[in-house]
Amino acid sequence: MNIKLTVFGIALLFTGNLVAGESLFGSGDNSIGFLHLPYSAAGAARSYEIANYDSLHMNFQNYSLWSQISNTTYTIMGGYAGAYGDDGVKSNYYSDLANFQGGFLGIPILRKKLAIGLGIQPVSNIDRSYTDTFNEDLNETLYIRGGISKALINVSYNYKNRYGIGLGYEYVFGKIADNYILEDPGVSVTRLSIDYEYRFYGHGMVISAFARPVQNLTLGLTVRPPLNTKLRIQAFTTSDDVNQSKIRDITFPGQYNLGLEYRLNHRNHIGLDLLYQDWTNGYKINNKNYSKDQDKFYRFGIGYERTQSEKRFTKLREEIDYRAGLFYGNLNQLSNGSSVREYGVSFGFSLPIQRFVSEIDLSCLIGKRGNLDKNSYEETFFSLGFTISASEIWFINIDD
């Protein structure tokens, strides 16, 4: 029996019920799933991070800023996201996902000058099932689960706290598994099951930098050149011919992120981020451009932050960081042949666990993605995130 099953291939033929992870968007032949937004909870709350430095955080976007830490510092993040969907017929689709969203550890070699760091962060995720019934006799079900992640080791250096650069090595890995079941519920022995595993592994690099051309302005940059990975496809069926593993070369597009932050005064900051990836021209399979249903990914965010007072003895409300922002973007895949827009608001705050030593950041995003007229489907979504950050007390002037 010669059976060829690609990720999401059968799913596109289904017109029945389906459930999903973070979103129903991101589905298509040879897709890697829904892209993860690479922000800490603090960055997500203000909708920018690339040019922001905080003494208690490891920056999730710009690793060159790690060079400014004084002591060993770590940040870990988790989150929960949900979406309510509408396809014009049914308006109560709901999908959700709770998962680990990244963690980093930084170690200063020369305080506030040279640091090494390492960490891990998701790239994409999928947790989805599709079901359909034909002629009231045969039930089809497709389960798809998994995702891709990256592990990082990075070295950062800055000159006089005004210019900095980071060079990092990234190892990309992950697995997407699908299970296709065709069965006749009236006959217990009539059942066909096909399992496939898609394992990704590859090596990449990341270059980051920051500059402070004037005292209160910080510029940030992160560049990831196109990433070449291997994809091993392994089937688990009753056919030895089908079960022979196959290798494909997968190229992910380069990623280019820009940001800036301006400090209005010691406690009030504004900033913006621009993220960009060209999946239309940069996503390749076996060195051939795969543009089917691909689109240019971009995200623009702008926000505000008010940081806590540095006074030792003050009111509780003055010990909290407050953040808010707006974002607008375009997903990396088409839906119904049209681009999928995404926009919304973000907000959050930080609470001290031990003041000036450790804290917890909370964020919330509320928005909309897709358009019923253009995409035949739309979602109202929300995302909750939290990070826990800790460091030894760093040297800071504290007023009485």
Image (cartoon, rainbow, N blue to C red):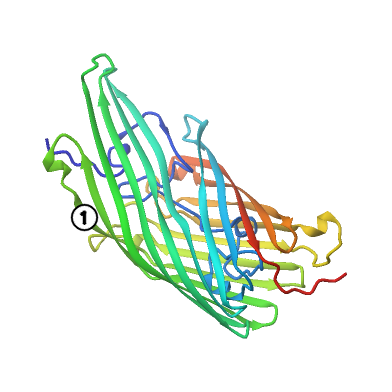
Q: Reply above or below: 394 against 176.
A: below
Task: Give the number of marks.
Answer: 1
**Residue lying at 17% horizontally and 38% vertically, measured from the top left:** 3
Q: Which residue is mark 1?
A: 247
The image shows residue 209 at horizontal and vertical percentages of 52, 76
Q: Quadrant of residue 132?
A: top left
Residue 11: image x %, image y %? 32, 37
Looking at numbered disc 1 in the image, what kind of residue is underneath it? Ile
| Rendered position, 177 above or below 88 | below
Question: For the residue labelled by badge 1, is the local secondary structure a helix, a strand or a loop?
Answer: strand
Q: Nearer the viewer, residue 324 or 394?
A: 394
Residue sitting nearer the eye, 286 or 147: 147
Residue at x 39%, y 67% (from the top left corner): 254
Q: Say which quadrant the C terminus sits in.
A: bottom right
Report the residue at 56% width, 44% height from top.
80
Q: Position of residue 14 (x, y in %)?
A: 32, 33
Depth order, front residue of 327/186: 186
Q: Locate residue 227 relative to residue 35 in the image: left or right.
A: left
Q: In the image, is 228 to the left or to the right of 329? A: left
Label 1 neighbour load within 10 Å: few <14, some 14-19, many 20+: some
Image quarter of residue 10: top left
**Furthest residue in direction top, as rendered:** 186
In this view, which residue lies farthest toward the bottom?
160
| Image x and y of residue 337, in percent | 37, 48
Residue at left 43%, top 48%? Answer: 125
Left or right: residue 257 compared with residue 347: left
